[in-house]
Image (cartoon, rainbow, N blue to C red):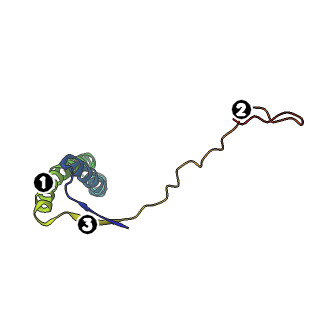
Amino acid sequence: MAKMQVKRVGIFSYAKISAVTCAAFGLIFGVIYGLIFMIVGGAMMAGGGRDASGAGAGSMVIGLLAMIGIPIFYGVLGFIVGAIGGVIYNVAAGFVGGLELELEPVANDYDTPPQPQWNASPPNQPGQQQYPY
């Protein structure tokens, strides 16, 4: 097992990973939040009156916008925070050293097995002289 140390991280790479992770969580929260608003809006529309149906429709629109807007907002915010975090990590790693990782090689299951070498010459017939190739 080899010990290695991460001395620097790519700020843009770190920010992208952070953005995707935050956007995924934003999608989960946005769907939950949006569904709650849409259910409440549907109940308000079914519940009665002109005022209630208008507010219910507004609530349903807010629910749809939450499903779209929250993941985008979380992704942008995650990118910004990830970039700041990458800069902070690089500065801190310069002072105290980087993150230590203990790595060991793993067999790659996706490698193709070695292929046999085929000889293009015809097999020797009895009585023929063998030539080394």
Q: Residue at x 89, y 37 (%)?
A: 126
Residue 100 got which mark?
Answer: 3
Residue type for callout 2: Ala
Q: Residue at x 15, y 50 (%)?
A: 80
Q: Quadrant of residue 116?
A: top right
Q: Residue at x 19, y 55 (%)?
A: 8
Q: Nearer the viewer, residue 26 or 62?
A: 26
| Residue 18 rendering spot, x and y as whole percentages | 24, 53
Q: Quadrant of residue 35?
A: bottom left
Residue 72 visible here: yes
Q: Residue at x 43, y 61 (%)?
A: 105
Q: Nearer the viewer, residue 52 or 121?
A: 121
Residue type for callout 1: Val
Q: Secondary structure at mark 3?
A: strand
Which quadrant of the figure contains the C terminus?
top right
Q: Secondary structure at mark 1?
A: helix
Q: Which residue, given by chain and number where applicable, does mark 1 sit on? A: 87
Q: Secondary structure at mark 2?
A: loop
Which quadrant of the figure contains the N terminus?
bottom left
Q: Which residue, given by chain and number where applicable, does mark 2 sit on? A: 120
Crowd around label 3: few <14 · some 14–19 · many ≥20 (10 Å)? few
| Residue 62 rendering spot, x and y as whole percentages | 22, 48
CB contact under 8 Å: marks 3 and 1: no
Instruction: Say which of marks 3 and 1 sits in front.
Output: 3
Residue 59 visible here: no
C-alpha span from label 3 to label 2: 53 Å
Of the residues under marks 3 and 1, which one precedes in the sequence?
1
C-alpha span from label 1 to label 2: 60 Å
Residue type for callout 3: Glu
